[in-house]
C-alpha cells in the first residue's frame, strides 16, 4: 500500500513537471526566453511559483531543460534529413535546407535557440548542441569523401564551418526586429535558404552551384 | 580654483577607471570571464571592491565594456587586413586569415570573445560585433563583385556565412580543453587556418582552391 502511494505521487509529480515544461516551451516559442517569466509560467501551468522551484533548482535550470528538449527535437529532424536516399552531398543539402527552413518557419523559437542572449547555463547547452550538429554533418562529409562526391578535406573543420555558416546567416533574418517580414510569406524564404545552401555546398565541394 | 580641483578629480577618476578596465582585461585574457572575479580585479587594481561599483553599475557592465574594447581592437585588425593592396578576394582571404591567426595566438581571450558562455548583457555585445565583422566582409564582397573576382551573390547573406564559418570552426580548437595543444607550436595552426580559409573562399567563389 505504501508502495502504491509512492507510485501515485511519483506520477503526479511527473505530470506537474511535464505541465511546467510544456508551458515554458509555449512561452519561449511565443516570446523567447527573455519573455518567459516564472510568474507567467506558473499561471499558465496552474501551479504556485514555489512549485516550479520544487521541480527545478532555478529558472536557468528550467530554461536549460527547455533548450535541450527543443534543440534535441531539431537535431533529430536534421538527422532524419541526412538519412538515405541520395548521395552524401544530396543528403547534406537536404539537411541544411531542413535546418534553415524549420528555423524560418518557427522564427521566435529558432532565434532563442540559435542567438538569443541567454544565461551562461543555457549558453553552455548551445555549445553542446552545436557540436551535435557538427557531428552529424561530419559523418555525412566522411561518407561523401568515401563515395567520391565530396573532395578530401578535414571533415571536423568543414562540419563546424557548415554549422557556423548556416546558423550565423540565420541570425539576422530571425532576429526579433526582422521576423515580422520573414514569416508573412514562406515562399519569400526560398532565395535566402538557397543562398545559404549554395555557400555551404560550394564551401564543401569547391564547385560552382 | 574650484574648477581646477574638479578637473583634477576627473582625471583621477578616469585613471582609476582605466586601471580597473586594464586589470579586468588582463584577468579575462588569462582565464576568461568566468575567472575574472571582482575581488581579484580589485586586488590587482589596488582599489576597494566598492570602488569598482562606483565606476560600473555591475560586474556585467564592466565585462560588457571589456568585451567592447577587446572586440573593437580585433575588428580594427580585420579592417586593416581588408585595406589594399590586392583585389577583394585576396583582401578577404587576408582578413579571414588574420582573424583566425590572431584568435589562435591569443586563445583564451579569443574563446571568451567568440564562445564563452557569458551574461546576456555581454552576449548582446557579441551579436553587435558579429554584425560589425559582417559589415566589413560585405563591403569587400561587394567590391569583389564589381571587380569581377567574386561571382554575383547576396552579399549580406554571404558575409554572415563567412562570419559564422570562421568563428564557429575556431570554437573547438580554442575551447579551454584544447588550448594546451594549439598554443604550443604556432606552425601547427597553419593547416587549421588553411582549411577554414579554403571553405570560406570556396563558399564565396564556387572555385576549387
Image: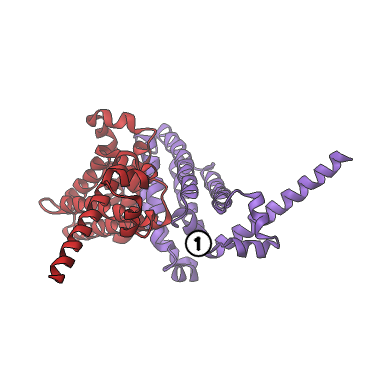
Chain colours: A purple, B red
What residue appears at the point 69 percent right and 56 percent down from the top-left corner? A19
**Which chain is mark 1 on?**
A
Q: Quadrant of the N terminus of chain B?
A: bottom left
One can see residue B184 in this view: yes
Q: Quadrant of residue A4?
A: top right
A46 left or right of A188 in image: right
Q: Quadrant of residue B62?
A: bottom left
Q: Quadrant of residue B125?
A: bottom left
Secondary structure of the residue carrying tag 1 is helix
Residue B171 rendering spot, x and y as whole percentages: 37, 42
Residue A13 rendering spot, x and y as whole percentages: 74, 49
What residue appears at the point 48 percent right and 40 percent down from the top-left corner? A136
Residue closer to the observer: A11 or A71? A11
B143 left or right of A203 in image: left
Image: B8 above or below A134: below
In the displayed image of the protein, which residue is found farthest to the front?
B1
Residue closer to the observer: A191 or B95? B95
Residue closer to the observer: B38 or A134? B38
In the displayed image of the protein, which residue is found farthest to the left?
B85
One can see residue A209 in this view: no
What crowding class fits label 1: few (fewer than 14 Cα within 10 Å), some (14-19), or many (20 or more)? few
A123 left or right of B135 in image: right
Residue A155 rendering spot, x and y as whole percentages: 38, 35
- Judging by the rendered image, the residue that carries numbered circle 1 is A34
Amino acid at each position: 500500500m505504501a508502495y502504491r502511494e509512492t507510485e501515485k505521487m511519483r506520477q503526479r509529480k511527473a505530470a506537474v513537471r511535464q505541465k511546467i515544461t510544456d508551458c515554458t516551451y509555449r512561452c519561449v516559442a511565443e516570446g523567447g526566453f527573455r519573455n518567459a517569466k516564472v510568474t507567467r509560467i506558473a499561471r499558465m501551468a496552474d501551479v504556485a511559483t514555489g512549485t516550479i522551484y520544487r521541480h527545478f533548482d532555478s529558472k536557468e535550470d528550467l530554461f536549460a531543460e527547455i533548450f535541450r528538449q527543443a534543440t534535441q527535437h531539431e537535431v533529430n529532424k536534421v538527422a532524419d534529413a541526412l538519412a538515405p536516399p541520395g548521395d552524401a552531398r544530396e543528403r547534406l543539402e537536404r539537411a541544411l535546407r531542413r535546418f534553415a527552413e524549420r528555423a524560418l518557419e518557427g522564427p521566435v523559437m529558432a532565434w532563442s535557440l540559435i542567438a538569443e542572449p541567454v544565461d551562461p547555463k543555457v549558453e553552455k547547452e548551445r555549445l553542446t548542441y552545436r557540436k551535435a550538429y557538427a557531428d552529424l554533418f561530419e559523418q555525412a562529409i566522411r561518407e561523401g569523401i568515401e563515395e567520391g562526391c565530396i573532395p578530401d578535406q578535414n571533415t571536423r573543420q568543414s562540419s563546424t564551418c557548415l554549422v557556423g555558416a548556416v546558423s550565423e546567416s540565420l541570425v539576422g533574418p530571425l532576429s526579433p526586429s526582422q521576423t515580422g517580414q520573414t514569416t508573412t510569406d514562406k515562399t519569400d524564404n526560398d532565395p535566402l535558404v538557397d543562398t545559404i545552401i549554395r555557400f555551404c555546398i560550394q564551401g564543401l565541394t569547391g564547385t560552382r552551384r
